[in-house]
Amino acid sequence: MKRAHFLQKVSSAIGNRTLPDQDETSTRQNTPTTADLQTLINKFIEEANAVKAETHLANDDEVAFEMVMQLLNNQTNNKYMSWDDNCLPIKNLGQRLDSVDYLRYQSTVPRDTTERTRAHIKLAEVSVGITGCNAALADTGSIVLESKPGQGRLSSLLPAIHIALLTTDQIYPTMESYIKSQPESGYNSSNLIIVTGPSRTADITQTLTLGVHGPGKLHIIIIDK
Amino acid sequence: MAATELSFYDRISDALAKPEGQLAISAGAKAKYDNRARAMSEFPSMEITRDRARSIRAHTLSQLDKFLAEFADNVEALGGHIFWAKDAQECNQYINEIARAKDVQLVAKAKSMLTEEISLNQSLETSGIDVVETDLGEFIVQLSGDKPSHIIAPILHMTREDVGNVFNEKLNVPFSDDPATLNAIARTHMREIFLKADMGISGVNFGVSESGAICLVTNEGNGRLISTAPRIHVAVMGMERLVPTLGDLSIMLQLLARSATGQKLTAYSSILCGPRRKNEHDGPEELHIVILDNGRSEILGSALSEILYCIRCGACLNACPVFHSIGGHAYGSVYPGPVGSVLSPLLFGDPWNPLPHASSLCGACKEVCPVNIDLPGLLLESRSQQIAKGKSPLLMRLSQWIYAITSCNPILFGLALRSGQVVSRLLAHDGWFTTLPGPLQGWSVHRDFPALAKKSFRQLWDKPSQD
């Protein structure tokens, strides 16, 4: 159907009608949340834990690096994928992991059809994905990721374990406050992702199980900056 | 959607004859109802947010042509393709054409009621394309050749043993009724499909007109995978599904999650803005968004337009006593429950006309609706439209005619009451009829009918008793 024809049909359907509560401009607004940093951090941790994400507090980069190492050590293989080093809050993370024999898989997927599938199948071997965060939302315990250059989508999606590195200055009280302060995040990349806990389902008799198609474990390392 | 061979009443009888299924549905819907109530009670500004959500929907629909044009312009500026589909046939044909032109063999699908509405899977399968549902519940529905019974929880009607048997038979795995084990089997089975699929197909939870973004929410992560791994992503969007801004979206996402599952947010809210960009690591090379009318513009122009405010959370199903008793399948529509009873006759025609009559108008659906849709009012409006068009059953017209005459005449009304009391005294036991005579007997197959009181209200009013 032609666009003009389609839209004409819609506009003539609307005509001069008034839809129920069309003009009710709600003047009542949510009171903006203001909170000091420590309250925000505590709220974020509480909510993230409630949705079964595991949170870890690190006083500095070194402690955070040790935590990443420890999480990787518990894995059956040494393969991981991640955002590029310059997009992660721990300096030279990839280089340092390489030097202790961890194997970083190339996370850029080729555009060619056959090569693309081959790359996907290879990436499926990886057990851990490491990403940074673009923001976090305290009232829902969510982390926000943008799929910009250097920040692939699959690192937070394909492996069974997702390690997200968050800095304390990235925590916003609510989604509204985040969007208000970063309105361009809705346009910046082809995919803005809000992650609230690990992958889950309750399709079978309302019983919650984790790790259906996305990561079953989500570790958030909160680095004090 | 084609009418099923059984009538609504036969389907209800079928549903009531399966007590295990009925118990599973009732327990599942109750659990979801309680989860929602808890999540809403913890929501500090719930009523304010609900009002805002309602005005956003009303505002969007009142200028839908403008917002659709803005949305389409923005999608195209981002390198996405827009196709305007008048009906199911145009939509399915377009997607088939892309599949043929791009040599698509395997399609991975995220859960979408809209694609069920237009029978997209059947259309692609006829062309020899493999279509795999990736939502766990929908996958089980597909394996067992069943139909979803709830718009959010497709296998609400199944017990865990049912699921275990389906996996055992269709996937050749040892029987297990442990949800975690069944989940792990599905994850392994599905992995390869995600990685090899040529095309991902999804619905759209919300389109954002100011940016041309579409938002998909899934708890499992399948929505993210099918919009990331395959080289082509096709999203089918009902034309009413827009919000003007990202800020509006954030309100809708919170209400949707709390109303649907009692979560504060769904595990993954994925906001997709065009196909993969230059220097990005992954994502689809092509994005096609099909904007579908399929009868919606007629609804927009009708007295039932408010039903288009719906954000498909399923809360009205979970609250509805009729849904609890008969389950989703009995409605014979992709959209069951109160919202489905209004929508189905509008979208699918006369065979669904009995649906709006299957309601006691108790109002539980309106109470839980995140955008406060006046569902009882719409059900009544739908009924009266049918009657105005002479589409109600003969027996109903006859009984309504008799009732109208009787209730307008005090003498006739008194006579009818008194004969009812006589019949009650003769046939009822301990205040209940266990069977009703003649055309009324259907009522008493699954429950008893209360007898008339010994003295009517009018009799008591005239002569108040001394005690």
Image (cartoon, rainbow, N blue to C red):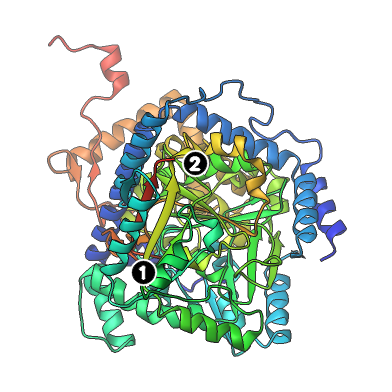
Q: Position of residue B21 (x, y in %)?
A: 27, 64
The number of callouts visible is 2
Tell me the residue that label 2 is attached to. Answer: A170
Image side of residue B273 versus residue B343, left or right: right
Front residue of B391 and B162: B162
Q: Residue at the location (69% across, 58% down)? A: B295
For residue A148, what is the image quadrant?
Answer: bottom right
Within 10 Å of disc 2 (Cα), the crowding (few <14, some 14-19, many 20+) is: some
N-terminal-most mark, 2 or 1 = 1
Q: Position of residue B341 (x, y in %)?
A: 50, 52
Image side of residue B276 versus residue B158, left or right: right
User: Which residue reaches farthest front?
Assistant: A99
Residue type beneath disc 1: Ala
Q: Residue at the location (59% across, 63% down)? A: A150
Whether A109 is drawn above or below A170: the answer is below
Within 10 Å of disc 1 (Cα), the crowding (few <14, some 14-19, many 20+) is: many
User: Which residue reaches farthest right?
Assistant: A4
Front residue of B109 and A149: A149
Q: Say if residue B234 shows up in the picture.
A: yes
How far separated are the C-alphas under marks 2 and 1? 25 Å
Residue type beneath disc 2: Gln
User: Which residue reaches farthest top?
Assistant: B466
Tell me the residue that label 1 is attached to. Answer: A160
Q: Chain of mark 2?
A: A
Q: Position of residue A199 (x, y in %)?
A: 38, 61
The C terminus of chain B sits in image quarter: top left
For residue A104, what is the image quadrant?
Answer: bottom left
Q: Chain of mark 1?
A: A
Residue contact between numbered discs 2 and 1, judged by CB atoms under 8 Å: no
